Amino acid sequence: MRTPKEVAAETKELEKLKSTLPEFTLFGDNNWKTINMQIDIINGNDDYENYVEADTEVEMAAYDAEQWLMGEIDSLTKEEF
């Protein structure tokens, strides 16, 4: 489980990522939806289980947030290979 300091730092990185994207695409899709959801999950305001039946992109973003929270992945904002 992540420490409050780690959660705060990752939340800051996710907010920084949001600042690089327009909120909506030209087609009206919300670019920030999954980022906001990840922020909510890592801060304990939401849970991966609420997204199990969601569309694939949303479910995977929720799963990644849960995995980060459990220490299984290093970052939500950097690609891992």
Image: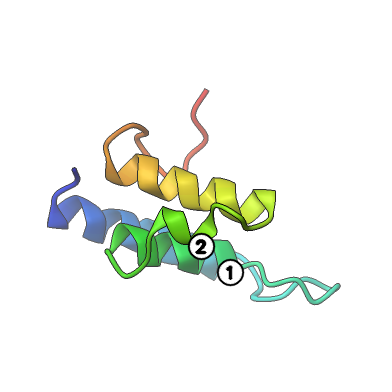
Identify residue for label 2.
Answer: 35
Quadrant where the image shows the N terminus: top left
Residue lying farthest to the top in this orientation: 81
CB under 8 Å between callouts 1 and 2? yes
What is the number of callouts on the image? 2
Residue lying farthest to the right in this orientation: 27
Q: Position of residue 2 (x, y in %)?
A: 19, 46
| Quadrant housing residue 27 | bottom right
Q: Which mark is residue 73?
A: none
In the picture, measured across the screen, residue 54 lies left or right of residue 1, that is: right
Residue displayed at 47% across by 65% down: 37
The crowd level at tag 1 (other Cα within 10 Å; few <14, some 14-19, many 20+) is some
Identify residue for label 1.
Answer: 32
Mark 2 secondary-structure assignment? helix
Q: Position of residue 54 (x, y in %)?
A: 63, 58
- Residue type of the residue flagged with mark 2: Ile
- Residue type of the residue flagged with mark 1: Trp
